[in-house]
Image: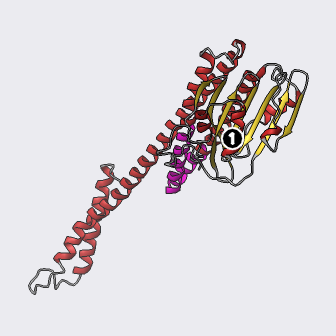
Amino acid sequence: MAKLFRHSSKKVGLPPGALVYVGKKHEQPLDINCFEYSAQHCESYKANTIEEIRHSADAFHWIDLIGVHHVEIVEKLCSRFNVHPLTIEDIINTDQRPKIEEGDGYVYVVLKMLDYDKKVNGIVGEQISLLMGPNFVITFQERPGDTFQGVRNRLSAGKGRIRKSGPGYLMYALIDGIIDNYYTVLERMGERLENSEEALLKSQSNQSLHELYHLKRELLLVRRAAWPAREVLARLQRDELPLIRAEHKVYYRDVYDHTIQVIDTVETYRDLVAGMVDLYQSMQSNRMNAIMKVLTIISTIFIPLTFIAGVYGMNFEYMPELDTKYGYFISLLVMAAVALTMIFWFRRKNWL
């Protein structure tokens, strides 16, 4: 299971703006994918260096940098677009809480991008940083693999208003792709919840309980990603940000509504998990009570039988009935009668 929020002591004692990468170490090389587009055309290309990245005033640009652990490249790219050092520091610190900041000529947004990995049967996540300027959007990712393929297809095909609506709409589309994938994650978690509930009712094994606690932790990760994202989207659709057109705010409001639905679903699933854990504990308690009930009844039946056997097991010479020819069989019959009488009494009292 991915840890979406990592804490590091690497930056303790360093001055503000110190560029130190905080996050999981990655070995993959740098990858920069670019789109240059307008209402009439769209061209995608790869850039091997920062100098190869185009930035013309008569077109819109989407620069997707994969590999924020390449600190020098990130710094060089941000410096080209006049990004403040404190913002660069936040980009390479992957322990950021989702937030929004307004800089000098740009808007900076941090979100958590979640996906469901079938190999580990759990959630994997990473920090995604978005920088939006007057005619560009830059996205910073930790590793390959994202939720933006639909946006790329729409840019290439020229469908909808994405090409002619500027960077404000492009950033909306990217954020919408991130939030919409939360639904995919929650759908898979819902299936796991159903399977866990069936397994719990059938087996009541410790494995079912472990799966529930695993789901509880993953739901906590989704919650910690979605709740701050709601605050980010609330500011995007409410605050007066010069780079976001008024006509685009209705789209951010729509994503905000999606985030609220995600949060509601997460809270519902958390309640379900808590209820299933309580159900498991109640079932285990009832099972233990049933076992103790049977053992108590057996012990209660054998108490008088043990008394009878103990009395006639004493080695006194002048005990009565010791010389009786059928004494042994009479003792067994008395024991059986006592046991049957007690069982009949327990049944009449509904104790059995």
Kindly indicate the quadrant of the structure image that contains residue 307: bottom left
Instruction: Tell me: residue 237, above or below residue 176.
Output: above
Chief secondary structure of the magenta portion: helix
Provide the secondary structure element on which disc 1 rests. helix
The disc labelled 1 sits on which kind of residue?
Val
**Label 1: which residue?**
74
Of 128 and 330, which appears nearest the observer? 128
Of 276 and 18, which appears nearest the observer? 18
Q: Percent position (x, y) of residue 108?
A: 63, 28
| Crowding near the residue tagged with mark 1, few <14, some 14–19, many ≥20 C-alpha atoms within 10 Å | many
Of 271 and 300, which appears nearest the observer? 271
Residue at the farthest right position: 40
Residue at the farthest top position: 246
Q: Percent position (x, y) of residue 312?
A: 18, 78
Q: Residue at x 62, y 38 (%)?
A: 91
Q: Residue at x 62, y 21 (%)?
A: 236
Q: Is residue 96 left or right of residue 289?
A: right
Kindly indicate the quadrant of the structure image that contains residue 116: top right
- How many tags in the picture? 1
Q: Residue at x 28, y 60 (%)?
A: 341
Of 31 and 97, which appears nearest the observer? 31
Magenta stretch? 194-222
Instruction: Tell me: residue 5, above or below residue 167.
Output: below
Q: Percent position (x, y) of residue 37?
A: 85, 27
